Amino acid sequence: MEINLLDLLPQTKRDPKARAAAKTAEDRMIAKRFDKDFFDGDRRHGYGGYHYDGRWLPVAQRIIDYYQLPADARILDIGAGKGFLMHDFLQLLPQASVRGLEVSQYAKENAYGEMGGLIDLGSAEHLPYDDKSFDLVISINSIHNLPPDLCKQALREIERVSRAHKYVTLDAWRNEEEHQALLDWILTAETYMSVDDWVKLFNEVGYTGDYWWFIP
């Protein structure tokens, strides 16, 4: 089902036209390394400084409430970054078992608090977990960084390791204006399409979870 569970995040003002005018092929190449430059380097390469500020705490509570997660829930965050959302899940559900998956060694080594020890290095098309391992599998603005075939496989893997709930957010558009804004904005995405085409893809691969869109 289409649902925005990120609506409690502070709204970030973005200027896709300005980014399009400034970004280069080299900027995209640097961003796709997902190292220090992406997380804590210049804004043209990614976040421009990725630090914990508590903004994910109300989002974590919203997700817990929406899915009615039990106190001992098993949660997987794919594309966990520095583990901010993982940390906030554990603040709210201290008995939960939370894991993160992340392609970035830098993010794992610079994770918030003790989260680095809970983050596994890997990519979403090959999840190193057993079938039906998690009550919730979540991936926010992450698996669209894979090329189409691997993105499809990642959705199948999410389906495989979840025993209950699944939630992904992905780069998308509803009209040509949003399409152009997305093309202007993206640095790392390899798979992006209209919301209607994403829904068709979900049906193709058998993804049955919830979803929402990143539209700059």
Image (cartoon, rainbow, N blue to C red):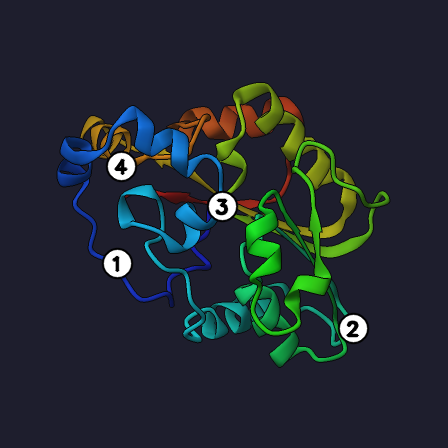
Give the Cα distance between marks 4 and 1. 13 Å
Asked whether residue 215 appears in the rendered view, the answer is: no
Cα–Cα gap, marks 2 and 3: 33 Å
Instruction: Give the amino acid at mark 1.
Output: Thr
For the point 49% across and 30% down, the residue is 199
Tell me the CA gap for discs 4 and 3. Answer: 19 Å
Asked whether residue 13 is in view, the answer is yes
Which label's residue is closer to the chain start, 4 or 3? 3
Label 2 vs label 1, nearer the camera = 1
| Mark positioned earlier in the residue sequence (2 or 3) | 3
Sequence-wise, the earlier of marks 3 and 1 is 1
Decide if residue 163 is on the left or right side of residue 102: right
Instruction: Please name the residue shown 61% across and 56% down the image.
Output: 108
**Judging from the image, what secondary structure is the residue with disc 4 in?**
helix
Name the kind of residue labelled 2 in the image.
Asp
Rendered view: 121 above or below 111: above
In three-dimensional space, the C-alpha distance between marks 3 and 1, rounded to whole angstroms, equals: 23 Å
**Label 2, label 1: how far apart the Cα atoms are:** 33 Å
Q: Which residue is mark 4?
A: 185
N-terminal label among 2 and 1: 1
Crowd class of label 1 (few under 14; some 14 to 19; many from 20; radius 10 Å): few
* Kind of residue indicated by mark 4: Trp
